[in-house]
Image: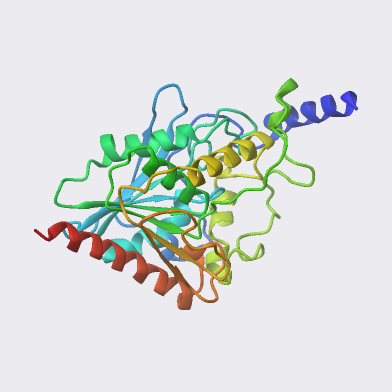
Amino acid sequence: MWRGLILGILAAGLAVACSGGGGLAPFAESRTPPSLGERFYPPEGWAWGFLRVGEAPAQRYGVAAPATVARAQILILPDYGETAETWFETARDLGRRGYCVWVLEGAGQGGSGRTAGPRDLGYAQSFDPDVTAVLAMASAVIRAPPETHLIVLGQGVGALVAVRAAQGGLASGGLILSAPRLTAPRHAPAPRFLGLDRLRPPGEKGWGRDMPDAFARGATHDRWRGGVTLAWQRANPDLRMGDPSLRWRTAFEAAVRAAREYPAPLSAPVLVVEGDRGSGCLNLTPCSSIRLAGGAEALELERDPVRDPWLTAIDAFARSRLADRSRP
């Protein structure tokens, strides 16, 4: 038994040495895949930055301002495995609606620095660095002036981070939780002996060029948008992400439990936007929810009949928060 486990760890070490983009340092300028259309390119004026809080590795973020004075700031927190590049089309669309759009990648994902190798391994001892980074992003980087709102949009796992940040004192005009992942199956804690918590569960894999994209996985019904993230990862080895480790799953479960057991209402209203499969507001207050028929998990990558109402819901929520702020 132990011989097999040790061989597994040695094999993981070889993967670090042999995989492209295997370093742990943060990565900024990505190369645009030739297969993508212009709508998936970076928005005009897009700029990259890094945010480092304490001893945690730097997290990558990007920003694009609208052509006119921004009516509000929108901070996007992507889902697990997504990159800022996944959100370029959405950033363009929200920019046309007058918003300054920021995308903060998760700790140890996308172009952010890593705490453990191989680079494509989702590893986290806790979600605290993600939460702390959101708080620092809002207070030290975005610094939205009083006359504008900061709206935080979390997708999937990013929605969980948004909720935990709000529970931790995030000052914002509101949260938009897009297909939020706020449930987690209970399992035994990941063993840390010999680094076993860095292994993936049986049957799960690292990144591969032939891995299924979001369309093939059923996360979206749009074939072209569903291939965007994988296209960027094929062209940029440093952006690649495989399945998460046992330790990441333990951290995710702990964050979900903390979010659901939080006793007090949030200081800002919440909008939950989901596809066909969803749980509504759960225990979040104050909260409203919208169900988009025909939508899967990655709503930002869905077909126009689903994605257009999703964008409209985001815009309407942000405008309503601005209207509330302007009332005496």
Quarter of the figure that contains the N terminus = top right
Residue pushed farthest bottom? 305
Residue pushed farthest left? 328
Residue pushed farthest front? 263
Q: Where residue 128 sits: x, y (%)?
A: 47, 33
In the image, what residue occupies the spot 33% across and 34% down?
136
**254 with respect to 44 (left or right):** right
**229 with respect to 16 (left or right):** left
Front residue of 153/109: it is: 153
Examine the rendered structure and indicate whether residue 91 appears above or below residue 131.
below
Q: Quadrant of residue 58?
A: top left
Q: Quadrant of residue 125?
A: top right
Q: Quadrant of residue 205?
A: top right
Front residue of 222/134: it is: 134
Residue 31 appears in the rendering: no
In the image, what residue occupies the spot 37% across and 44% down?
166
Q: Where residue 68 sits: x, y (%)?
A: 17, 60
Q: Where residue 105 sits: x, y (%)?
A: 45, 43
